[in-house]
Amino acid sequence: MKKIIALALLAFPALAQKASDALPRPKLVVGIVVDQMRYDYLYRYWSKYPAGGFKRLLGEGFSYESCHYNYVPTYTGPGHASVYTGTTPAVHGIIGNNWFERETGKDTYVTDDKTVQPLGGTVAAGQMSPRHMLSTTITDELRLATNFQAKTIGVSMKDRGSILPAGHSATAAYWYDGTNGAFISSTFYQPDLPEWVKKFNAAGHAVAYLTKPWNTLLPIAQYTESSPDDVAWEAAFKGEAKPVFPHDLPVLAAGAPAAVQQVLKNAGDTKNPQPPTQNLDLIRSTPFGNSLTTDFALEILRQEQMGQRGITDFLAVSFSSTDYVGHQFGPNSIEAEDTYLRLDRELARLFDALDKQVGKGQALVFLTADHAAAHAVGFSNAHRLPGGGVGPAVMRDSVQSALVRQYGPGQWVLSYENQQVYLNRQLLKKKNIELGKAQQDVAAALLTLPGVTQSLTALDLQRAHWSEGLGMYQENGFYAPRSGDVLTVLAPSWLEAYSFPVVKGTTHGSAGAYDTHVPLLFWGWGVKHGESSAPARIVDIAPTIAQFLHIQEPSGCSGTPLRDVLGR
């Protein structure tokens, strides 16, 4: 057969020319973002990872060992936007998961869009789109380069983890609604959910995962990389006396509304009915949220024939349960370790499916994180390490009190979001107080508070330029129409503690390496094995993928292609 093809190409040179003109591209690009994954998780649990997940990526792919975010705040919304737009919040406009809108006088959510309607879920969960994001994404650029023939689909337990990567022109984006245990979408993408999605939801996958307790994958005595199971700085699930294994998920998710009873009925087993569940949102805070995400991602591959249609497609997968578990228990918990050991197996399941359905070496995969995380304050204090916590409400009220003492009665502070103070500019104008003076007074007041090491005014950021250091991080995260009047910098390992004054679990958001240093791995099509210790920035991912695909980088891109992995 090969000889016949060769003779045909010799006899008809035009055919040979046509074959040689085919642009080499992977059949599928898979972007994986692990929510709140510290770089050191790649190696902390190394001895317990089997061969098919992280070890396969590191053993066959290319690793950038010094990849960092280059802005603050390091949150989920900005992180996903920066990975896929190749730029910082100063350009793409996603300055946080929430921010204060001066036009409306209210907070807004990163993917909120009241102009669209939910598909398959509640109004609160489903009125979502990428309308706040000001730049195109690498997924948008693939759609443009293929005259919208490429499919680009996002999936995540979090709406922002699916919507922002999928882009403005996405084929689809799906996220989880805990009120009914379903993957949902909005009319921004399509008029109705595909039948295969409805069938998947009706099967009751989320319900099934919550019918068994969460116990450790390995014998608990083997979790020697983590703190003891019962420590004061971990937060228990609602209904638990202590944050310890086993976590009795059926009990914690007890009671069943009519909608869930119908899901159970549709799921099938009438002889051995599953225990009723009500709190289907609970799955987010367990490793089984990642399992459910993998289940749905594999169904997307099958049903949408991703990478199997003769054109390059793009699947954006964000694993979110790592973030929920990390916030609740902290990076040194047995829960966090168990979640990553289980995630490793989910990755292996995904990679095996790519081999079988797309072909070995035919998919280009990258894996990174939207941010990392600090150690829990209690953990640091127990080991005589620096660290502390301060509540956002304390920050806001302290500044408000200082301004009342200086300027007199009035609501001087409208909001404190993303470690930023939003001043009442109308009141300042009414009282003939210059905005610049008020910002300086707020900056001075903030510096008197515990844990605050620096405060920058919006005017300072707009009048100066920093190419490195904390100023650079603040400048790259600042977008004037949405950012606050004064930006705060906390001391290393100090957190915004929402459970203040008793600090449970951990969070992220700073310019510290514990928040900015994340893994960056490339694997599959066109990737040679290797690693680099050269500095890499998260904004370099999108232009690197653009180079692999020979397409335009996103419209706001400020990153540069990573030459080592490209082999150029």
Image (spheres, rainbow, N blue to C red):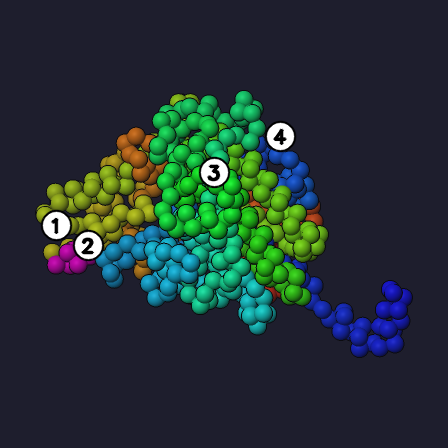
Query: Cα distance, mark 3 to mark 1?
Result: 53 Å
Q: What's under tag 3, amino acid-wise?
A: Thr
Judging by the rendered image, the residue that carries numbered circle 2 is 424
Q: Quadrant of the N terminus?
A: bottom right
Q: Position of residue 309 (x, y in %)?
A: 65, 65
Is 427 included in the stretch rendered in magenta?
A: yes
Query: Cα distance, mark 2 to mark 3?
Result: 50 Å
Mark 2 vs mark 3, foreground winner is 3
In the image, taking residue 9 as reference, residue 488 lies left or right, namely left
Q: Position of residue 42 (x, y in %)?
A: 57, 37
Judging by the rendered image, the residue that carries numbered circle 3 is 211
Q: Residues within 10 Å of mark 1 (few under 14, many from 20)?
A: few
Query: Cα distance, mark 2 to mark 1?
Result: 9 Å
Q: What's under tag 2, amino acid-wise?
A: Asn
Judging by the rendered image, the residue that carries numbered circle 4 is 47
| Residue in front for this viewpoint, 557 or 448 | 557
Q: Quadrant of residue 425?
A: bottom left
Secondary structure at numbered mark 1? loop
Q: Earlier in the sequence, mark 2 or mark 3?
A: 3
Judging by the rendered image, the residue that carries numbered circle 1 is 410
In the image, taking residue 557 as reference, residue 240 lies left or right, namely left
Secondary structure at numbered mark 4? helix
Q: What's under tag 4, amino acid-wise?
A: Ser
Mark 3 vs mark 1, foreground winner is 3
Q: Earlier in the sequence, mark 1 or mark 4?
A: 4
What range of the chain is rendered magenta? Answer: 425-430
Query: Cα distance, mark 3 to mark 4?
Result: 30 Å
Contact, mark 3 vs mark 4 (Cβ under 8 Å): no
